[in-house]
Image: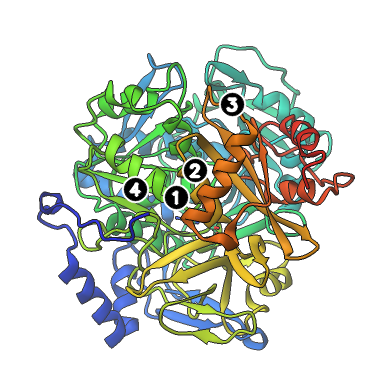
Amino acid sequence: MPDHFFRVPGDFIRPGTLTAGGLQAQRDRFAADPEHYWRGLGDSLDWIHEYSQVKDVSFDRADFRIRWFYDGVLNVSANCIDRHLRTRADQTAIIFEGDDPGVSQHITYAQLSEAVNKRANLLKAHGVKKGDRVTIYMPMVPEAAYFMLACARVGAVHSVVFGGFSPDSIAGRILDCQSDIVITANEGLRGGKTIPLKANVDLALLQCPNVRHVLVVEHTPAHYLTHDGRDISVPKALESMSADCPPEPMNAEDPLFILYTSGSTGKPKGVLHTTAGYLAWAAYTHQTVFDYQDGDVYWCTADIGWVTGHSYVLYGPLANGGTTLMFEGVPNYPTVSRFWQVIDKHQVNIFYTAPTAIRALMRDGEAPVKASSRASLRLLGSVGEPINPEAWLWYHKVVGDSRCPIVDTWWQTETGGILISPVPGATPLKPGSATQPLPGVQPCLVDAEGKVLDGATEGNLCLTDSWPGQMRTVFGDHARFLETYFSTYPGMYFTGDGCRRDEDGYYWITGRVDDVLNVSGHRLGTAEVESALVAHSDVTEAAVVGYPHDIKGQGIWCYVTLKQGVEGTDALKVELRNWVRQEIGPIASPDVIQFAPGLPKTRSGKIMRRILRKIAEGDTSNLGDISTLADPSVVADLIEGAKGLG
Ligand code: 6R9
């Protein structure tokens, strides 16, 4: 793959776009006076009581603290709504595009204000107080946004559980954060199918006797079972609610939300984010990375159940007074042109999605994309996993008509917002690289012993100092927080990712370090091999894991999904093996190629390598929990297909 710069076309720059000079000025300001630089972010918020203290951080485990803007008082919903009403009451805040292409809705800031205030009063009427945890299990509809903001308005801590999770997963999360209110909808809609959200909650609550109330949004006409005294119909209850609920004054460090995320071990962790720092970072990064300006229509396809939905569907865009699109559906319903049709219908300027979606759409070729205009697009974004150069180039050329820059944004649930990313008017791009840290972000690469590595090198990605959007703790388990993130390399936050830094100072995330292979003493990123495989014209997707090998220590096992109509022959295996040797080198030569019609993925599209490793190791007696997979049935096929290969 070419390792050259893509320069952003000159006509991308508008008045107000951050250019190379402006970005460098920000970096210089940070270097000269960090506190003054951070104040610029704090001052972008609307405060009830101004803060005077900017930052109080120590990553030393004996004396640990992370506090930002910590003597200030503010409210997140007031920042996302009230402060815009004077100038933007009639501007669209949220565009809703339903699963059914015939359904869409524009919600103005004035309408958003009324909706959120009423729901905030509804929460209060059901006993929700500042600091209480509220579980939200909803489809991608405006009601989800209304209730998240209503929680913020009354000072309650929301815990959004992705609408694809099972009753058991819901129950585990409700119990872990001791939440006694659940908000759900009777049904969700995705790809023309209904999802029985309320019925799932009913099952979950068999394990959660502590839950007092379930507030039910009526999204479809379908009837649902009502447990008397516990379940409340939201539309009925709203009839008597006032549209005036004063925002609760919150300390900068009061919790805003909990979001559960999986680690490499144990049950999901409740990542806790607080009020001011999180919002300041979501707003700053949304504005800077997407060059968001007044009037832009911005669409992030992430579900509100993931951190990307929190920061870049909801909080960042609304803090900036933006117009954000919420899409209920899926990329291939009713047709594989759906994304591009939505872009034309709503004249979307900025489009932010995940590599897995792009690779899936690549399979169907260019025609479904080219059937749309996409003339409104000016910027494309990628998040969630390394984007292989092949997919990057397709995204750039086919979706973006070679016009639109791509921002490959690296971050995590734990980081609250983007940390490493191009700034599109300023940073020359390299396909597959998240490029450089944003101003104020201080990454470093360390070796296994914790030695900091300089220059062009490869190592484990850490952050040597805090940024405002950093998570503050694991809910209910601060010791686990310190253990997971601050013990591997004392004094630093360890991301769990491996990373290469090239001679231009560009960062290339190589994937989770738990996925690093050591083949004959050579270190190799699984993502590198995958990237090479998917660059082959017959391959759609690939997942690579290590397995024990008598001579090399670890061998390379490649699960490969072929394009439709391509036959998985032995000749093709030989060809792919040679292809990888050619793309990376002989050390990367695959030992096993297994053709796989489907890969085990979480519902957010991440490949579950843990399962693939077990299958490759021949250790299938204990695969662990596979219930969170989008399609658990692929596992049996893979076990069958693996027989006799290793
Ligand atoms: C935002 C989000 C975090 C992990 C992270 C890394 C991977 C995310 C990436 C990327 C390469 C990118 N990741 N963005 N890898 N390039 N642009 O996805 O949060 O679900 O917590 O996942 O995803 O491995 O550590 P989360």
Distance of label 2 from label 4 (alpha carbons)? 34 Å
Determine the residue positioned at 50% across, 32% down: 140
**Does residue 249 appear to the left or right of 46 in the view shown?**
right
Marks 4 and 3: in contact by CB < 8 Å?
A: no
Marks 3 and 2: in contact by CB < 8 Å?
A: no
SS at badge 1: loop
Q: Which residue is mark 3?
A: 567
Tell me residue 601's x, y (percent). 64, 40
Tell me residue 306's x, y (percent). 54, 46
* Above or below: residue 401 compared with residue 346: below
In this rendering, the count of numbered labels is: 4
SS at badge 4: helix
Q: Quadrant of residue 101?
A: top left
Distance of label 2 from label 3 (alpha carbons)? 16 Å
Q: Depth-wise, is mark 3 or mark 4 nearer the camera?
A: 3
- Residue type beneath disc 2: Val
Marks 1 and 2: in contact by CB < 8 Å?
A: yes
Determine the residue positioned at 9% across, 55% down: 15
Determine the residue positioned at 37% across, 28% down: 339
* Residue density around tag 2, few if under 14, some if 14–19, many if 20 or more, within 10 Å: many
Instruction: Give the mark nearest the N terminus, 1 or 3.
Output: 1
Closer-to-camera residue (559/347)? 559
Instruction: Give the mark nearest the N terminus, 2 or 3.
Output: 2
* Above or below: residue 613 compared with residue 439: above
Q: Depth-wise, is mark 2 or mark 4 nearer the camera?
A: 2
Instruction: Give the mark nearest the N terminus, 2 or 4.
Output: 4
Tell me residue 208's x, y (percent). 80, 40
* Residue density around tag 4, few if under 14, some if 14–19, many if 20 or more, within 10 Å: many
Tell me residue 621's x, y (percent). 90, 45
Q: Which residue is mark 1?
A: 388
Closer-to-camera residue (69/366)? 366
